[in-house]
Image (tube, coloured by chain):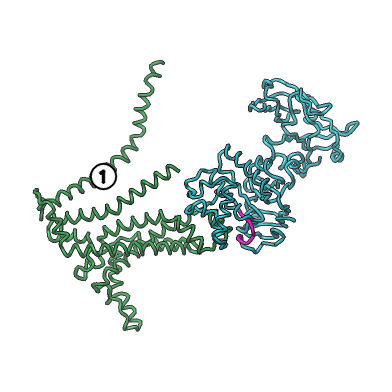
Amino acid sequence: MAALSIRALSKRYANLEVLKGIDLDIESGEFTVLVGPSGCGKSTLLNMVAGLDRPSAGTIEIGGRIVNDVAPKDRDIAMVFQSYALYPSMTVRQNITFGMECRHVPKAEQEKAVANVAKLLQIEPLLGRKPAQLSGGQRQRVAMGRALVRNPLLFLFDEPLSNLDAKLRVEMRMEIKRLHQRIGATIVYVTHDQIEAMTMATRIAVMHQGSVQQFADPDTVYRYPANLFVARFMGSPPMNTMPARLEAASDGAVVVIGAGRPDEVRLRLRGYDAAASFVGREVVFGIRPECIAEASRTFSSDAPVRVDAPVELVEPTGAETMVLLRLGGEPAMARISPDIRPAPGTTAAFALDTRRICLFDPETERLIA
Amino acid sequence: MTDAVLTRPGRSAATELVRRLPEYLLIWVPLLLSAAHLVSFALWTIWISFTPSTLVPVAGWVGLRNYTAVTASRNWQIAFDNLLLFGSAFVLLSAATGLILAILLDQRIRGENLLRSIFLYPLAVSFVVTGTVWSWLLNPGLGIQKLVHDLGWTSFKFDWLIDRDMAIWTIVIAAIWQSSGFAMALFLAGLRSVDADIIKAAQIDGAGPVRIYRRIILPSLWPITVTVVVIQLQFAISTFDLVRALTNGGPGIATQLPALVVYDLMFQRSLLGRGAAAAVLMLLILLTVLLPYAAWRYVQRRRAAHA
């Protein structure tokens, strides 16, 4: 059963269209991440699911019931806010029980629910404290406790980790993922951080300028980005994209980067039948940094492609060495072995994993193959 | 070269001093001057209160005689009782009025800016003007009572201004009119500073507007409430011009307040020593309000620093 169905949802403020016909179906138990740059409409969408904002058109269905005219409290949802939004004058315990108090749940039942949640999140020692006496991570936990205690059909998270420092963010990220695995809740999670999206989601909806660019599992989004926006937004550093030309070859096609230049790069494509209609035309060539490596790398393929390329910049990160090089005159990032440090200004040999190349239509920016 | 490096720390300290000289001059000179005035005149008044001074200050020591004389006088006793009644009624009612106005303004109504200015405007009016205008309004022969009589309701009676028992309430009314806008401004700022996400969270939790105000918004206002109460209280204790213009302590001495007693003793009866004693008593009353407030602020700040 779909836990959440969104149909042709749009939102207009005066003459500014914030959301343009969103369609999403989220299955029960899924961890869906809405990701996009700021201003893409992801938080507006979440607010409308929560009932805090009204859509201009379209329907929202939670658990098979259209909730457009249902008050937030009756939508069977719980929400975790970026600012945590804990009630400052109440203790942690009162923060967690406030919703039950509003719904007139008997005291004994409230006690039991608080005890369960406190144990799950390990916040038992904090129950008597006020939010001001808690650290960022503890507040985050209490905010989640307040959502969990409701045991709703749908959890909504609005950038819950962006106020935490980097280390705590990684910890809480794992904790939220573990929580999802343990209780199997349906979660809609908004973030601008593509790493959070990749690491936590079972499905990612990449949003840009008020519409969903791609809605798929993380691997698909990463491996087959639906368009240039998704290709450049997901991944850090993002996918290298550059203009190229597709030419016919004896057994398929060849991508030519920097055609006509002395250092032009010709890459033979295999298994890109969908690109056949683009032979003889311009395309946008995309390759992930990890698909360009030092020459000795084989990418577990029988015949990796090797090219010589000038090295412009070398960034050792410890775990790997990032190299800015030129492919047929176009800049590209490569992710090579940490102990290899080609000298800037020289030309070095690199291996390319041509099985994972993406080609985009330069007109529509859509993925061809 | 070596010399330059070695002397650099000393030189930079000197240039630092020169650079910050305007700050020191602008902040410390006025601060020290005003502190010196405040402290020296307070000390001088305390000294006078222990001398037998009458028309002019004279040296001598009379111990607590001025104090016993003041506290035994009927004038002071009435003034003190009036202060208790006026102070508590005015502070509570103006805070309540301000809070209600702030909550009503917080409902995202049209013309909010205009209304806010209107409610805040009395604060820009001098107390003498407030007192004078209200003395006309409350004068039975000129103001509200006459207006209602002229409209035909001739049995209407509103003569608190000349009623011994009710006259003090006219001061309360005028003072509330003058300063509840100020309380409103502070409360409105407090209401607006409540994080919008908290309200949204409460809506999702199922709380209605009354519960949201009662359980979430109003509790977060109490630091502002303390500030409002303390500021209004110190105004109440030092009230002089309002009463002087509105009732001048009358009818009789029914609306006497400590500041009027000080003025009366010092400048009308030429009893400088006793006037000074009454002034020192006022200062003590003020300190009973301000010292706990200062202590509370200190505790709050320490707690904030720990969190």
Chain letter of the cyan region: A
Q: Secondary structure at mark 1?
A: helix
Which chain does tag 1 point to? B
Three-letter residue code for mark 1 = Ala
Establish if A71 lies above or below A367.
below
- Spot occupied by residue A2 in the image (x, y as percentages of width and height): 73, 55
One can see residue B134 in this view? yes
- Spot occupied by residue A309 in the image (x, y as percentages of width and height): 74, 24
Q: Quadrant of residue B262?
A: bottom left
Establish if A248 lies above or below B56.
above
* Circle 1 Cα neighbour tier, 10 Å, few/some/many (<14 / 14–19 / ≥20): few
- Spot occupied by residue A87 in the image (x, y as percentages of width and height): 51, 53
Q: Quadrant of residue B273?
A: bottom left
In front of the other: A216 or A89: A89
Point 67% across, 62% down: residue: A67
Establish if A266 lies above or below A142.
above
In front of the other: A140 or B151: A140
What is the number of callouts on the image?
1
Point 41% across, 58% down: residue: B185
Q: Which residues are magenta?
A: A72-78
Establish if B294 lies above or below B176.
above
Q: Which residue is mark 1?
A: B35
